[in-house]
Amino acid sequence: MQIHALEIDDFLDADYTLISIHSGLEDYKLAYLLNRELGMLFRKSETSIEIKENGQEAVFSVYGYKDERQSNQWYLIANKFQGVSEQPISNGLFQITNETVNTTTYLVPEKKKMDFLIKIEGDFDSFRLHKTINSINKIKQIITSYSIDTTTLKSKDFLIF
């Protein structure tokens, strides 16, 4: 009798494509330029991705677009959150004061140079992916964009929502 053990990965929907975007733009400006160049309608999502790390809460903005013709769901997600935290400064055994420190938290820590990512849920063939990346790279405010192999990511659990 053969026994098959189910793992949590068996239930996860891995049918998505990721595109990395490097740009110094604000999220709303990037969404506007992508809408104009790709003919989409990215809109700010009511929900965002929230992560608590080292006592600090990081909130990553999410923009969504549903492509009815191709049956795809697109998400534009910020990879960086810059916040301010207070860390105690101590002298030996006693805490003297709190110091305000600027901190940066990453949604995908192994891709720290990536500013944004696009997650495309559903079937998306390599020809359309290549065409989409070329269109994104035509935007002069974008440094570069490229496809990400989802199997290489350690922190892809944050991308399931």
Image (cartoon, rainbow, N blue to C red):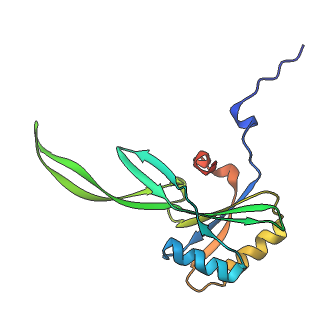
Q: Is 159 drawn above or below residue 148 in the view shown?
A: above
**On the rendered structure, is 136 left or right of 90?**
right
Residue 82 location in percent, x, y?
Answer: 39, 62
Vertical arrangement, residue 49 with respect to residue 80, above or below: above
- Asked which quadrant contains residue 33, the reply is bottom right
Q: Position of residue 23 (x, y in %)?
A: 53, 75
Q: Residue at x 57, y 79 (%)?
A: 142
Numbered circles on residues, count: 0
In-image side of 106 versus 117 (left or right): left
Q: Position of residue 39 (x, y in %)?
A: 72, 79
**Residue under the point 66% across and 83% down:** 36
Position of 119 relative to 141 (above/below): above
Give how far across and how far down residue 44 sits, in percent.
Answer: 57, 66
Most foreground residue, 104 or 121 = 121
Left or right of residue 150: residue 70: right
- Farthest residue toward the top? 1
Nearer to us in this view, 13 or 32: 32
Q: Residue at the far front: name it.
A: 46
Residue at x-position 82% and y-position 23%:
4
Screen quadrant of the N terminus: top right
In this rendered view, identify the residue nearer to me: 11 or 150. 11
